[in-house]
Amino acid sequence: MTTRRDFIKTLTSAGVAGCIPELGISQPALNLLKESATSNLIWANLLHLSTNMWEDNPYVSDHSLLKDAINAHDVYKDDYKYTNYKEACAWAMRAYRPYLINEDKTWDSILKNMSESGMNMVIIDLGDAVKYDSHPEIAIKNAWTIDRLKAEIQKIRSLGMEPIPKLNFAASHDAWLGEYSRMLSTRQYYSVCKDLINEVIEIFENPRFLHLGMDEETAKHQRRYDYVVIRQNDQWWKDLYFYVDETEKRGVRPWVWSDDGWRHPELFFKKMPKSVIQSNWYYDTEFDLSKMSEPSLTYLKFYDDLEKYGYDQVPTGGNWTNDTNMEDTVKYCKRVINPDRLLGFMTAPWLPNMDICLGRHLEAIDQIKIAKNKYY
């Protein structure tokens, strides 16, 4: 088994301003970055540059949260005329598309509103939406060039926010890897993943964190896939340790979703390195454990469990299912997590960056702003 190295504690508490070039960054933006570094609280938004994370074919899944969105049997077609944000979400994110779905004007509006609302971190799900130098064959049509991505990273910094890359290596969310997603845990697969981790860290100029995903790797979450594969037992851990090691070799702290611990809590707390930041997620409205039943009880209580075992956390809520979750998430986690281990919060609206979805994006931003102002 891979030996885990103790992670350098200063990486957790280090400010972002000191490692960001000041050229082209306004003084107010620098002040915001320094303020964020001092408080060490993250207020993040997860944005999906790539949308090929949930399906490996073009047929829209019957995801329970999107059933009421689908008004026609041919919603999966490229030219489907969606009429609301739920249909757009079903069309864009619950079906594989071999081309980029990202509207520049919407992307810019989201970033501007995040900055104005006091948010300080943008987590970008990169996937196949970038034409990587190391593996350009992964890129979908109209994927961003490296120069374009670097320009957007600089734009984010100029707005006083910290850009963080995300590469989801979960077998349930890796359709973006193309043919390599069907080579899981092979020598060639490891070589490609290593190349991508190193290149992304270089592009982002050694960011503080790299989010590795690793959520929902179950057969259930691939029930609509053409090709179903999961890793179990020591193989899942072996591969996780590989990603973590490759990330830490570059002085970057790894970050994952925590839901594997819902299914295998004893093994999770035995094997999950403390150097890895945890993002448990819960999107419902009930936050009283005494009134809850399974599986929601396990999902919410896992914030408490992670705290009990001493993990650093960035709790995740959002407006995916309702409009009150983010405020309640901040309230609950501030109460149950030690401030030394509560690194901040993330909202995850799970929406494509399309104009028809912009209103919902802005609602997610407004909700985390309200929670931040109310409890901090």
Image (cartoon, grey):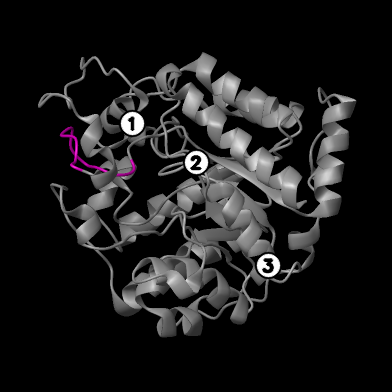
Please provide the residue range marked out in magenta: 53-62
Q: Secondary structure at mark 3?
A: helix
Instruction: Tell me the residue at 27%/19% (across/down).
Output: 82
Q: Which mark's residue is nearer the viewer, 2 or 1?
A: 2
Q: Name which of mark 1 and mark 3 comes first in the sequence.
A: 1
Type of the residue with mark 2: Asp
Instruction: Tell me the residue at 44%/43% (across/down).
Output: 322
Q: Give yes or no for contact between labels 1 and 3 (Cβ–Cβ under 8 Å).
A: no
Q: Is residue 55 magenta?
A: yes
Q: Count residues near mark 1 (Cα–Cα under 10 Å), then give few for <14, some for 14-19, many for 20+.
A: many
- The answer to whether 16 appears left or right of 67 in the picture is right
Determine which residue is flagged by label 1. 89
Instruction: Tell me the residue at 23%/34% (across/down).
Output: 68
Q: Secondary structure at mark 2?
A: loop
Determine which residue is flagged by label 2. 323
One can see residue 250 in this view = no
Nearer-the-camera pick, 144 or 319: 319
- Determine which of the numbered discs, if any, sits on residue 335 in the image: 3
Distance from disc 2 to disc 3, alpha carbons, whole Å, reads: 21 Å
Type of the residue with mark 1: Cys
Vertical placement of residue 39 versus 272, above or below: above
Determine which quarter of the picture holds residue 337: bottom right
What secondary structure is the magenta-colored segment mainly?
loop
Q: Position of residue 217 (x, y in %)?
A: 31, 61
Q: Position of residue 190 (x, y in %)?
A: 38, 58
